[in-house]
Amino acid sequence: MEAKPKSVCGSASLIISKDVEPRHASETLQFVDVMGAAIPVPHTCNTHAFFNGFIRSFIKVHLIQRGRISCSIVAKPPICNGYGTLHGGAVATLVEVLATACARTVVAEDKELFLGEVSISYLSGTPENEEVLANASVVKTGRNLTVVTIEFKMKKTGNLLYITHATLYNMPVASL
């Protein structure tokens, strides 16, 4: 029986393949621990729709026009990774929120929006506590879909950080 590496996040049912060297498995588990996987989620955060409100709290909207939204986001520590930069998952979540909000400026309220595809080019990291400007624009809208592009730029320098495209499908609400 193989000895299992010690890890805070490793469960009792952890299985490590015989093809993986024990040293590599141990290093991988240590990395996952360092990245915070073992930190428990506070009970107050374990509620319905907590994450939606949490992520929206980092967005400050500056402009809403038909087919366009401009806002800023500060890369606060709760949405940054272990390297001190804005977490890629936080960027993806911000894209979903902003693309949906931007699409809502042109899509009728009686249509449900479904996020079908997201493309994100991560060009540079956003350092912790830096402000990012995000500009979302509807590129195409039709009967069945809406495409939104979002550019994220560093407020201080204007450097492009992320370029994104989101495709949202417009579905009529079913009447029962």
Image (cartoon, grey):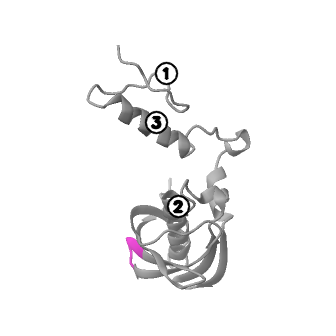
**Residue 92 higher or lower than 158, as above or below:** above
Q: Which residue is mark 2?
A: 93
Left or right position of 24 against 95: left
Distance from disc 2 to disc 1, alpha carbons, whole Å, reads 32 Å
Q: Residue at (51%, 30%) from the top-left corner?
A: 7
Report x, y in % for residue 145: 39, 71
Label whose residue precedes the other's in the sequence (2 or 3): 3
**Residue 150 higher or lower than 110, as above or below:** below
The magenta span reads 141-147
Distance from disc 2 to disc 3, alpha carbons, whole Å, reads 26 Å
Report x, y in % for residue 71: 61, 78
Q: Nearer the viewer, residue 167 or 12?
A: 12
Q: Residue at (54%, 74%) from the top-left corner?
A: 104
Bin the neighbour count of mark 3 within 10 Å (Cα to Cα): few under 14, some 14-19, many 20 and up: some
Q: Which residue is mark 3?
A: 29
Q: Which residue is mark 1?
A: 12
As for residue 144 lying within the magenta part, the answer is yes
What kind of residue is marked 3? Leu
What kind of residue is marked 2? Thr
Q: In terms of secondary structure, where does tag 2 sit?
A: helix
Q: Residue at (43%, 25%) from the top-left corner?
A: 14
Q: In terms of secondary structure, where does tag 3 sit?
A: helix
Distance from disc 3 to disc 1, alpha carbons, whole Å, reads 13 Å
Mark count: 3
Left or right position of 44 against 10: right
Report x, y in % for residue 42: 70, 41
